[in-house]
Amino acid sequence: MDLLKRAAFVVGGIFLGINLINYFVLGHTGDYLPGGERMGEWKQAAIREACYSALESPESDPLLPKLTTNDHRVDWRDLTRAKEMTAALNCYLVTHPNAICERNNRAYIVDYINRYFAKADEMMTTAKRYGEAEMSTVKNLWDSPRNREITAALAKDTGNGRLIKADFGWTTPAAMKPMLDRYKGTSDNCPRA
Amino acid sequence: MEPLNLIRQFLALILAFAGGFLVVGGWIWAPQLSKLVQSAFAEGPSVSLFADAKRIGRAETAPVVRSCIFKALDLGPDAEKMEPSAAYFILKAGSMQANVSAMMGKNDGWSERRTTELAASWGRLANCIYAQEDREICDPDSRAAAVEATTKFFAYAKQLDGSSGKPAPSATDAHILQGYGDRLLIMLKNHRRYGTLVAADFGSFAAPEIMRIMREENQTRDICKR
């Protein structure tokens, strides 16, 4: 019995360790989204490759996030990431509005929405250290025309049931909670094959 | 109760405590640990790992870096279009490359030239930072930049003094670097007296010249106090 307990402890430790590495080190957060009929395999999402071109030269798109002042504390890596994430999510939700209806794409897009809001929150948390002016700079950065298009597309997708609270599991971004709660129980209007 | 059981229970208690500490500590300190590993192994000597987080911020986003980086680093005619934090990153990346070369024992003319350039760039940056208004260094990001530029200048200058086996720089380069070093030591003394820089900002691995000033000079006022 003791041997069984020990073996179970070791197996449990290995299982926990592998999952912690997968989530926190490799960043495969999509593996921990809920499964089921609506959600497929994020690694097989076709939308990912379809949107590669949107990420080729984000600097040429004037509607993507940009800094409105030179007096700021935003690191260029954060700025670049904000641009890339906005360009990508804009492509997933706005350029290809029906992509989210496919199971694999939905899993990938839901994971990406989580990352998008997490990055915005992280930058806002850093900005808080520097006061109101910096917070306003970061707020403006994440309020570019492309970001507003994303917000509108998210509102539309939650309104027509293409995105529901259950898709996010326990990782629903705070910014999306009111939208998802408002349209709770809506069935999706995706075109049926 | 048997003594063996007591020992087992005691060991279990220690293990439970250690496990709990690892989980909670890992959760709290994992981001700092990752930064620590990055700065210790990827970017060479930097700011103190044990410095007060309220005193030492993010050097790359410091206002003084914005004012000084393009004076310290020549990145061509279009450099001004670049974000200053990106230019600072280029300087750090160059340092990282030189560190890797040094670790692999590359000691040729090119690596000596590269070390001289890096020492000069960090020296120019540090001198420019200290030439700003003294109170600028009260800002944690600017203080981090001042500390990092100073530490790196002295670290690269030391590599050129002959003690590390690298060929000595030309007389002109040596004279320029000597000038940067002398000015920096004067500025360090002033900032130690003003309370803008303290020993803990540099940590224990900074150049002996820096630590001597931090130890020997006393703070006479606190210009950061409003």
Image: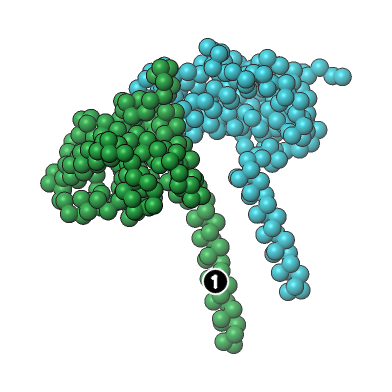
Q: Colour of chain A?
A: cyan
Residue A124 visible, this angle: no
Left or right, residue B225 beside residue B121? left
Left or right, residue B2 beside residue B93? right
Q: Nearer the viewer, residue A138 or B214?
A: B214
* Extreme residue in the bottom direction: B2
Residue at image position (74%, 18%) is A98
* Extreme residue in the left direction: B220
Q: In this rendering, is residue B61 above or below B150?
A: above
Give the quarter of the figure containing the C terminus of chain B.
Answer: top left
Local packing at callout 1 (Cα closer than 10 Å; few below 14, some 14-19, many 20+) is few
Q: Quadrant of residue A44?
A: top right
Identify residue for label 1. Answer: B13
Residue at image position (62%, 28%) is A113
Q: Nearer the viewer, residue A152 or B211?
A: B211
Q: In this rendering, is residue B211 above or below A181?
A: below
Q: Colour of chain B?
A: green
- Give amino acid for label 1: Leu
Disc 1, SS: helix
The image shows residue A162 at horizontal and vertical percentages of 72, 23
Residue A107 visible, this angle: yes
The image shows residue B210 at horizontal and vertical percentages of 25, 49
The image shows residue B68 at horizontal and vertical percentages of 31, 28
Left or right, residue B62 beside residue B90? left
